[in-house]
């Protein structure tokens, strides 16, 4: 069987050596009985981490995964969008150049923020997947450092 464009999440996690067939069968039984997304069930059962889930979803959707803590963040890019908007859409800009804006999202299939980023910046969005925890942490970090700067300017 060659590379399928619609490879299933379970297949990807198996190929990556992150799960056993038993793990998947157990999660499928839960899904059959209670419903829900397979990845979330595997996460709740402790079989995979959020990073592993996002990485596998990225492979499935052909959207690269980025670990934001390993990237040199452009804080000016983070502050291009309102923090509440970014939290609502689990999206953050982490870099920008002449032609592109680099965005980390937790759900690339349901992120209207990507189109807004294109319209507001007139730049081509380059989308990466990241964990919602890392995205929210970066938004909070940018706002905390911006608040300190404002307080320093007022005090000066």
Image: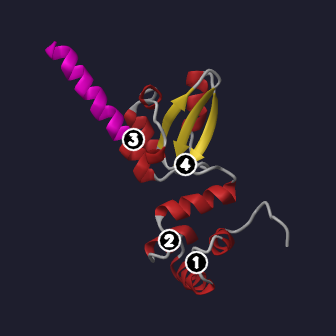
- Please say whether residue 151 is one of the residues in the magenta stretch: yes
Disc 2 crowd rating (10 Å Cα; few below 14, some 14-19, many 20+) is some
For marks 1 and 4, the one nearer the N-term is 1
Query: Residue 9's image quarter?
Result: bottom right
At x 62%, y 71%, the residue is 13
Contact, mark 1 vs mark 2 (Cβ under 8 Å): yes
Measured from the top left, where is residue 27 in percent x and y? Answer: 55, 80
Q: Which residue is mark 1?
A: 19
Tell me how far mark 1 sits from mark 3, CA to CA: 30 Å
Badge 4 marks a residue whose secondary structure is loop
Count the numbered circles shown: 4
Measured from the top left, where is residue 99 in percent x and y? Answer: 65, 23
Q: Which residue is mark 3?
A: 138
- The tag on residue 132 is none
Q: Is residue 150 left or right of residue 42?
A: left
Camera-side residue: 137 or 35? Answer: 137
Highlighted magenta segment, given as a residue range: 138-156
Contact, mark 1 vs mark 4 (Cβ under 8 Å): no
Tell me how far mark 2 sits from mark 3, CA to CA: 23 Å
- The tag on residue 48 is 2
At x 26%, y 23%, the residue is 149
At x 61%, y 62%, the residue is 56
- The tag on residue 66 is 4
Camera-side residue: 84 or 79? Answer: 79
């Amino acid at each position: 069987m060659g590379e399928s464009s619609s490879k299933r999440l379970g297949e990807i996690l198996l190929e990556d050596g992150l799960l056993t067939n038993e793990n998947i069968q157990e999660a499928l039984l839960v899904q059959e009985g209670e419903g829900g997304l397979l990845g979330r069930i595997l996460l709740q059962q402790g079989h995979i981490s959020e990073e592993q889930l996002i990485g596998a979803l990225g492979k499935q959707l052909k959207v690269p995964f980025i670990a934001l803590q390993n990237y040199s963040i452009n804080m000016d890019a983070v502050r291009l969008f309102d923090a509440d908007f970014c939290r609502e859409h689990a999206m953050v800009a982490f870099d920008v150049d002449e032609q592109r804006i680099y965005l980390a999202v937790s759900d690339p299939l349901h992120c209207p923020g990507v189109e807004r980023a294109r319209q507001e910046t007139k730049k081509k969005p380059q989308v990466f997947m990241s964990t919602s925890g890392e995205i929210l942490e970066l938004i909070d970090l940018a706002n905390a450092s911006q608040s300190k700067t404002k307080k320093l300017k007022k005090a000066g």
